[in-house]
Amino acid sequence: MSSYKKFTKDVVLISSVNFLVVIKGIIFLPLLTKILGAFSYGIWAQLLVTVGLITPLVRLGLTNSLVRYLAAEKNKEYVREGVYSTLSLITFISFFIFLLFLLLAYPVANFFQAPIILVIVLPFIILFECLNIVIFTTFQALQDMKKYSLFMILASVGEIAFVVFAISSGYGL
């Protein structure tokens, strides 16, 4: 397959997946506001913004370096070493953030006006979000857009299914 065809195919695939990810927000907004109310949606939005602000700090720009330095690398051992070292460092920093959130759980919960359990779960979400981004970036660097797209779709569908299950089971936010 020529490089132009592969590029076009990858762009169409990623565009389609990104469109489906955007639809996730359209599904969540009425679901959360109608069933849980505006207050719970406000807490949900605050938690998402917190995750969105902290994850780039935890990643330290290492995911960008994965794309920069591993995209042209053919040695699988070198790629593996780069990915594992990035995952290790991000896990270590996420563990530090986890301890920080546990120590400051009550003040953070009071600041967000959220239940304490959500503040305790927040570092886990940050950890998994950072690790997901590293894995997605690895697929991007290796130009394996089919796996990248598959995992993006699975992550979005899984998130929607989990939220619908939690809300329909009466667990709330």
Image: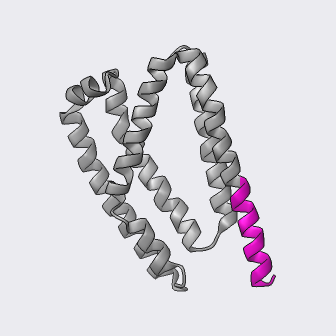
Residue 30 rendering spot, x and y as whole percentages: 63, 25
Q: Is residue 48 above or below residue 96?
A: above
Task: Name the one closer to the observer, 157 or 4.
Answer: 4
Q: Which of the 4 quarters of the picture holds residue 166?
A: top right
Residue found farthest to the top: 170
* Residue at horizontal 76 percent and vertical 63 percent from the top: 12
Q: Is residue 55 above or below residue 40?
A: below
In the rendered image, residue 66 lying in the magenta stretch gets the answer no
Residue 142 rendering spot, x and y as whole percentages: 58, 74
The secondary structure making up most of the magenta span is helix
Q: Is residue 138 above or below residue 35?
A: below
Residue 161 rendering spot, x and y as whole percentages: 63, 32
In the rendered image, residue 10 lying in the magenta stretch gets the answer yes
Residue 71 rendering spot, x and y as whole percentages: 54, 79
Q: How is the image coloured?
A: one colour
Q: Is residue 60 above or below residue 155?
A: below
The range drawn in magenta is 1-16
Decide if residue 3 is on the left or right side of residue 140.
Answer: right
Decide if residue 155 is on the left or right side of residue 68.
Answer: right
Residue 172 visible: no
Residue 166 visible: yes
* Residue at horizontal 37 percent and vertical 56 percent from the top: 56
- Total number of numbered labels? 0
Where's the N terminus, which quadrant? bottom right
